[in-house]
Amino acid sequence: MAGGSYVVLRNRGLMTVTGEDAGRFLQGLISNDIEKLATDRAIYAAFLTPQGKYLHDFFIARIGETPYLDCEAGRLDDLRRRLCMYKLRSKVSVEAAGDGFVVAALFGPGAIGALGLDREPGRAAPFAGGVVYVDPRLAAVGARAILPADVATTALEEAGFAAAEAAAYDRLRLTHGLPDGSRDLAVEKAMLLENNFDELNGIDWDKGCYLGQELTARIYYRGLVKKRLMPVEIEGPPPEIGTQVMLGDRNVGEMRSALDGQGLALLRLEAVAEAEREGRALTAGRARLKPRKPDWASF
C-alpha cells in the first residue's frame, strides 16, 4: 500500500486536560514545554516524582483546542489520580476521554508523505475528525493518530494504509531503540536521561521548573549519565524483563522488552565499551546480547 501500514494500539488510552488553567497546570508538571503544543505540533513528555524518577510518559496532541494525552491504557487511572493531586485551586479538568477515540501507529516508507506531513518530529495536522502527527521522538518510526473510533479504520485505508499486526510495530520501535512506557521504564526508579529522553525530544531544557526537574537537570549538566537504554540483538532464548545483564561475573545492566531476536537493555556504557574492546559477550540468562548504538544517539 502506498501509505504503509497501520496498527490500532489497543494498549493506549486517552485523557483530556481542559479548563482555563490547563496550560499553566501542565507546564508545572511535565518535562516538555506545553507552549510548543499547537494544532500543527504534538509533543512527547514525561511526568516524574518530586525526586525526578519516572512515573508516566505520553504524547500530547490537540484536536481543535483540546489537548489529548496518549498514554498507557492500563495505567490511565493512575495518571489521572496523580495529576489531580496537584490541581489544588486550578481551574482545570482532568478526564479519561472514553471510547470515542482510538490511537494508531502509522509506519512504512510512505507513511508520513501519505498524510501530507513533512518529516519534522511532532508535525501535526487535522485528519478525519482527529489528528495525525509525526512521532515527536523520531520520524524514522513514522506517525501516530488519534481518530474517532467509528471512522478510524475506513479513513486510514482510504488514505492508502493497510492493517498490520501489533508485533510489526513492536519490532520497529525495538529496532530503533524506543521504550514502550512501563514495559521498559521502571516506575519510580527509571531516570529520563538513562532512557534517552534528552535524545528523543522528551525534555525542554529552557522551560521553567517542573516536577522532578532539579535532579534531571543536575544529572544533565554534570554529565552523570553512566547507563543508557540500548537496542540489543539477542542470540538464544529471549530473556524476561528484569533479567540481569552480565559481563563475565559482573552485573552491568538489566533487560527490558524483547521480540524476535531484538530487545532493549539498560546498560552501563563503560561495560559496553569494554565488551566491544575486548571481544567479550554480554549475557542475560542463557542468551548472548550484542548492543547497538542507535543511529540517532549521540551518547
Image: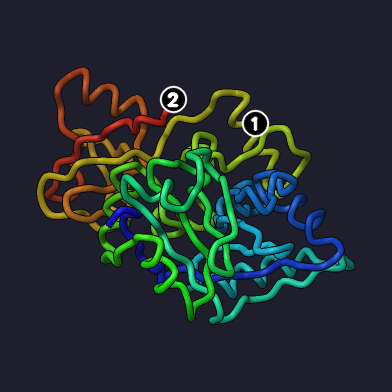
Q: From where the camera sits, is residue 2 visible?
A: yes
Circle 2/circle 1 CB separation < 8 Å: no
| Mark 2 or 1, nearer chain start | 1
The answer for how far apart the CA atoms under marks 2 and 1 are is 19 Å
**Residue occupied by mark 2:** 298
**Is 8 on the left or on the right of 257, as rendered?**
right
In the picture, measured across the screen, residue 299 lies left or right of residue 203, that is left
The three-letter code of the residue at mark 2 reads Ser
How dense is the environment of label 2, judged by Cα within 10 Å: few (below 14), some, or many (20 and up)? few
Residue 38: % across, % down: 69, 51
Q: Which x, y percent locates residue 21?
A: 85, 61
Q: Which residue is mark 1?
A: 218
Apparent side of residue 130 relative to residue 242 in the rendered image (left or right):
right
Q: Quadrant of the C terminus?
A: top left
Could you say where residue 288 lies in the image, as x and y percent from the top left? 14, 41
Mark 2 or 1: the one toward you: 2
- Give above or below for 77 relative to 59: below
